[in-house]
Amino acid sequence: MVIIHAAPELGEFLQNLRLGGRRIGFVPTMGALHDGHASLIRCAKRETDVVVLSIFVNPTQFNETADFTNYPKTTDADLNLARSEKVDVVFSPQVADVYGNEMRTEPTDYGSLTAAFEGESRPGHFDGVVSVVRRLFNIVRPDVAFFGEKDLQQLAVIRHLAKLEFPELEIFGCSLIRDDDGLALSSRNTRIPRDQRSHALELYKALLEVAEASKSSGSLQAAIDRNLTRLQRNEHIELEYFAAVDSKNFAVLQSEETSNQSFAIVAAVVAGVRLIDNCRL
């Protein structure tokens, strides 16, 4: 496994591989790696010849300074996981390597994709996401980039970015990975006190009930309303949103009919930790 910190060095290294006909896969992360990230790496290993894993905590996508400061940094463990999953290249840049001398973001307006839900709850978040992903795509120049379906709206935003600016790049969505008790894996889960974990699991239970109701005609909206009320009344949960959407554009479903693009989505704060989750309907 090669560890590279500077963008020019990475570009030269990968160019030599491209000239040899190798297909480059890219897994961008912010570190604090877990089994969900490992599943992305395995997807990349199956689909491409060379896997580049980036570890870069992007300061421009955090709305709260404290959230950025408290984001877990586990460099040694991250590198050990990367080695065990046989990553070919780890790209671990400094802020200046990605943003240059001026750390700024460009406003991103993809309609409801960037305005609703995460866009509304976290103003400017997608400006930061799109800015850093655009820069990383330009540095790595991958053939395929791999993102998890846990960050479902982010995946849709990045698909749109690629369609507009990187038409030759394939965006590969990998399945959401859950812990044994059903909690969606997240680097933030380590901050949930053990005695509060059951409250976090209420989010997944609500999603499952809506998914089950979607199989019966006329039951979807009633299940959404019922679980929305239940979560709002739970004093341990600060609910931000709970809805059924079309994952292509993140418009709220207007009928009981669903497709393979229909998802129930939720965001909430439990024990001071912001959690998001989703479930296909």
Image (tube, grey):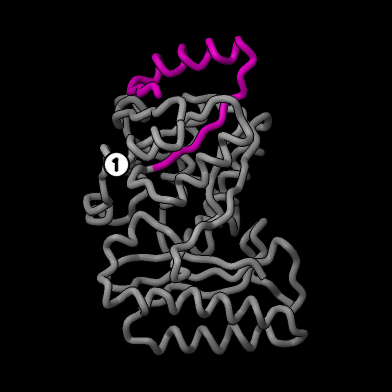
Badge 1 element: helix
Pointer 1 local density, CA inside 10 Å: few below 14, some 14–19, many at least 20: some
The percent coordinates of residue 269 (x first, y second) are: 35, 71
Quarter occupied by residue 1: top left
76 and 265: which is toward the camera: 76
Residue 240 located left or right of residue 251: left
In this picture, is 147 found above or below 219?
Answer: above
Q: Tell me if residue 116 is in the magenta stretch.
A: no
Residue 241 located left or right of residue 199: right
268 and 47: which is toward the camera: 47
**Magenta residue span:** 1-29
In this picture, is 56 found above or below 175?
Answer: above
The residue at 75%/66% (across/down) is 259
Quadrant holding the C terminus: bottom right
In this picture, is 160 found above or below 258?
Answer: above
69 and 128: which is toward the camera: 69
Q: Tell me if residue 8 is in the magenta stretch.
A: yes
Residue 218 located left or right of residue 23: right
In this picture, is 176 found above or below 182?
Answer: above
Of the residues shown, which amino acid type is indicated by label 1?
Answer: Ala
Reading the image, the residue beneath label 1 is: 77
The percent coordinates of residue 174 (x first, y second) are: 58, 49
The percent coordinates of residue 242 (x first, y second) are: 52, 75
